Each structure stands twice: as C-alpha cells, then as structure tokens.
Image: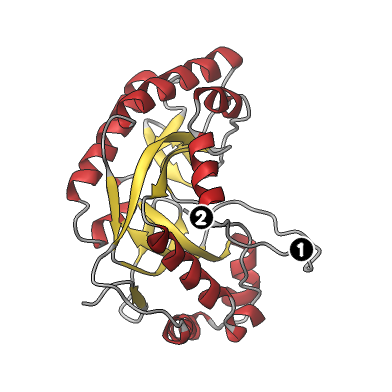
Amino acid sequence: MPVHYTQPKNDSVNISDLHFHAYQQRQLNEIRPGQIIKNSMQLVPAGNFHFNNATWMPNEYMGYAIVSMLNNNPGNEDLIKFLISIQQILHENIQPINGFYMLPADSLHQTIANTLSNENFKKNILCPGIEACYPAMVANAFHKISMIKQDHPLRMKLIGLSIFGTSLGILGVFESKGDYNRIVRFRSGFYNNEKLHDLDIKMTRPFIGHITLAYCEQKLNKNQKEYLASIINEINENIGSQDHYFMISNTGLRRYNHLAEFQDGADFPVYDFTYR
C-alpha cells in the first residue's frame, strides 16, 4: 500500500532495503504477541475514509505506485478468499462498530515501490502537467532494470497479522533468499533511474512484505486496543499453522485517487518477474 511517510529533510540520509536475514527477523518480530499488544497501543485513525449515513466514503489521496495486485497475479484465487475471511472475522469482533474500513478484495495488493502521493504527487507531476508522459517514464525505468527473469513466480509466505500504526495487515516472509533479492534488485534499479530521481522519486522506506486489510478510522480507547490485540493474536495462532502464499509474477504502475481503488491504464507499464 502507499504509506504515509515523511521523508527526512536531510537528503544525505541513506535509506536502503534490509538484508535478507534482517528482513525475515523483522517480520517475525512484528507478529509476536507482545509486539502486537505494544503496536495496538500506538494505533491511531488513518483519516483515509469516513463513515457517512451508513456508507463508507473515501477521502482524497492521489498518486501512483508500483504494485502487485492479488487479482492480477495467477494462483492467488484461494488466497483472496482466505484474506476476505480474515476481514470478516475482524469485522465481526473488533470494536468500535464501524471503527475500521475493510478494503475491497479488488484493491488488495503488495506495494513493490512507492512513487509520489498526495502533495508530492501534485507538486511534481500533476501541477507541472507531466502526468500524460509519466507512464512512459516509468516504462523506460522498467526497461533499464537489469535482472534475469525466472520460470517461477516469487512466493511470499504470509505469516500473521500486524498493526502498522493506522492500519491492519498481514505480513510476509520469503523461504527463498533469491525471491527476496529479486524484489530488492528491482527496487534498486527503479529508484536509481536518473529521470525518476529528478522528479524526487526515491526510496523512503525499506521493502516490507505486507497486504493491508483494513484502516483504523475511529479513535480506540485502551480497552478496545487491548481487545483488538487479543483478537489478532488469536487469529495469528491459526495462521501460523497454515501455509498461505502470495504468488507474485508481475508488478506494474497503478493510479489512485483514494486508497481503496488502484486503476490500470492502457499505457501503464507492467514488469514481469517471470517469462510470459
């Protein structure tokens, strides 16, 4: 998902992706019961959606991202059903009522690379009037990424729910170091593209394998946060005994006006991690 993140003003700060073992450990730590309780205490409303007369309405949040959509990568049909079932459990159990917006199945995705969103998008792409040529710039960046394609998709194993500050999502690890490194190499090639860098497109956070399922949209009291943590820990006990994989064959440019719909376009580039 596109993440609310403030880039440090000091451009000399070097942000890079984690090494494989550090990445795996980071993900496993985030689903430990004690960490879930700690994260629940820091949960705040996202401000991405609002509940109006029995209907959820999105708030504007515009931009582009390089994402792998679940429904646009073969082999994820059962995974989508599983994630919908998790959303249903959350919806039926956590409080307050209508405190969380459950993302529609068609919007579920893994963000491979953030580009520009909200005010940065307006400043660097929309207002200068270069949006029409932006997909071609991204396509050119894809073309210059040097990476050997494989005959199999990347397999990200989903290990448990976590709390991200304003949202709930499910985290992923990689059983194959090679699969993780394919993502890291793609991101390195993409963010090192000179023309994109001139638009202020740069790495603002390390890659974190996750699929966002819900946004918190009401303030929770301490009891509600503790109860949320207990529900998530209970769900994670079941997830830990199962094998669920997100099969990632491709990623591509998507446009969004809000965070519940990621639009494709006729000229939007797609990068294949595998042979077609």
Residue visible at 57% across and 34% down in the picture: 45
User: How far across and how far down the image is residue 175, in percent?
Assistant: 36, 50
Identify which residue is drawn at 50% across, 23% down. 33
Give the residue displayed 79% in from the left and 62% down from the top.
9
| Residue 155 quadrant | bottom left
- Residue 20's disc is 2
Question: Residue type at mark 1?
Answer: Val
Q: Residues within 10 Å of mark 2 (few under 14, many from 20)?
A: some
**In 3D space, how far apart are the residues under numbered discs 2 and 1 (Cα atoms)?**
21 Å
Residue 122 coordinates in the image, percent (x, y): 61, 69
Mark 2 vs mark 1: in front: 2
Mark 1 surroundings within 10 Å by alpha-carbon count, few (fewer than 14), some (14 through 19), many (20 or more): few
Q: Image quadrant for the C terminus?
A: bottom left
SS class of the residue under badge 1? loop
Q: Which residue is mark 1?
A: 13
Quarter of the image where one finds residue 104: top left
The amino acid type found where label 2 is placed reads Phe
Residue 147: x and y in percent read 41, 79
Q: Is residue 216 visible?
A: no
Considering depth in this image, is 214 or 68 the residue closer to the camera?
68
Q: Position of residue 265 (x, y in %)?
A: 33, 74
